[in-house]
Amino acid sequence: MVLAALIALTVSLPWVSVAQDAPDEEVSPQQFNAIPFGTEADIPDTGGAMLQPLEIPNNLIVLPDGRVQVTVELAQPAAIEAYLNAGGKEAAGALSVGQAAQSAVLADQDRFLASLSGFGVHAQVITRTSFVANSVTMLVSPDQVEMLRALPGVARVYYDALVDRDQYRSVPFLNIPTVWNTMYPGGSSLGLGVVVAVIDSGIDHTHTAFGGSGVWPTNPAVRQAPPTDLNFGLGRKVVGGWDYVGDAYNAGNNAQSPDLPPSPIPVPDPNPLDCSINPADLVPTFGFAPVGVPSGHGTHVAGTVASYGVNADGSTYVGGYNSVPFGALKVGPGVAPYASLMSLRVFGCYGSTASSNVATAIDDAVSGRFGVQADVINMSLGSPFGYGRDDTVRFLYGSVIPNAIAAGTIVVASAGNNGDTHFITGAPASTPGAISVASMRHDVAEGGITLTNTTADGNYAARPAIEVPPTVVEGPYPIFYLGAEDGCQASDYSNISFPSGHVAMLNFGPCGSTTIYSEAALANPANRPVGLLVVSNTSSFQNLTCGPRGAA
């Protein structure tokens, strides 16, 4: 899931450091501080209090041997603080200062890790961050989690959570060519000069949509070696990247391919190539063709962002974007075809990843590890029921995302695919500062509410009323919609021959609830409703203030 329209706009904007919000005011270095986790003024800080071992939620990473994966955030500031104090994104030399500070952060982590055995903690290190957060992710016994919290130099401990790919849809109806041709001439609206980091299942940079050869290497040794493709490297379509996990990695969700057990220990390599969507190509990796079909999720997302387009014969489209022959193309161009991509692979061929892998990828996208900083980070992934405040299992996202934004990187994340209900937005999209994006269907137009043989079934206990005594209305009753009538006059019911014995559903009109109730009570008995179902899309709309009211 990608906010294609947002990217079409953001790739056209000049990049302005947060230090320049007040350009006429001299800003001292002391004003810049890395954003610590859980310090919002109006939110109580739990101090990183953890769940007890027996209360570990089942969406977290627990190995068959019982060890749990946790991320330890250390108290020493991350390198982002030195970077911002040196002037941030718009200051020459600031990135070098920040990268030098990473060495001190990593040395701090080394000292901490060396001390663990002396405290009786036995840990297997999985990954680290050092630029936007000072953290180490490790596997430990559940009974050692509280011990970690109490150690000197530890700021917080988080359980590592499962993260899944959020599904995607194309966006052919955004009218992006209008933006290309009329809004920002000269290539800026096509993404020229902008680097978008795609944190996902990798990018198939061999695909001709990105100027590749069109030949995906089936030899695992080639896919684990540094890429030699002509379109990969600084100054090229895919400026760089990293595979944080390896093909076989799966943090715990094997629903996509049940014949492959979870493999939660990452095996990183320098080649962030996405998996082939042909299971037969994966026989050299797994020893057989898995049942499930890899989605190519990261490649699709990257294509939506910055594909050149593919001709009908499979070759890369190079015909320009003033007049694109969409109907003649096998794959259309992305919303910003001249943008560069950074491929940060956090998923294996199948299954889930860990939130710590996502945090590490964010860290690398901002730190300049691959020779350039990302201008935009896209994450079409998440864990459902994200929480943007401070709770006992909050992710490290609360540190890495605000600090990435402070460094001048726009962070875009999927709201998730878990339906339309309360608190369903996933993490990291729920993190303050991230741009949370929901998908939409381009092929469905809702016609509003249609009521057919519908009843207001139930027993609605009355709430205190103002003008008449409370009563109880017992269903079932059928519902009849008043349509254009607003119920402000008793004649509204006879005008439409309202059927008696029905509940009236009506839009909340200008006359107020007292009049709506009184006029309904005065309606001709043959057209009088037995109850009112009042609807409004006004944010301040509350329950009716007179008449019998249901408690539902």
Image (spheres, helix red, strand yellow):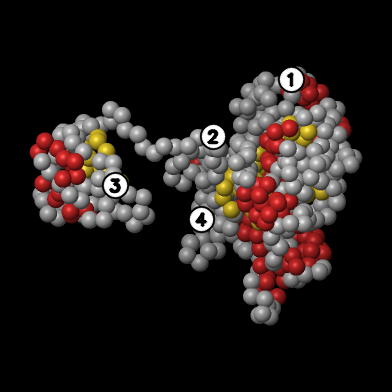
Quarter holding the N terminus is: top right
Quarter holding the C terminus is: top left
Q: Disc 3 designates what residue?
A: 507
Q: Secondary structure at mark 1?
A: loop
Sort mark 3 into few (<14), some (14-19) or many (20+) by Cα contacts within 10 Å. some
Task: Identify the residue at image location x=32%, y=49%.
Answer: 536
Nearer to us of marks 3 and 4 is 3
**Is tag 2's residue or tag 3's residue first in the polypeptide sequence?**
2
**Is tag 3's residue or tag 1's residue first in the polypeptide sequence?**
1
Q: Disc 2 designates what residue?
A: 443
Q: Disc 1 designates what residue?
A: 289
Q: Disc 4 designates what residue?
A: 389
Mark 3: amino acid: Asn
Task: Identify the residue at image location x=21%, y=32%.
Answer: 477
**Is tag 4's residue or tag 2's residue first in the polypeptide sequence?**
4
Mark 1: amino acid: Ala
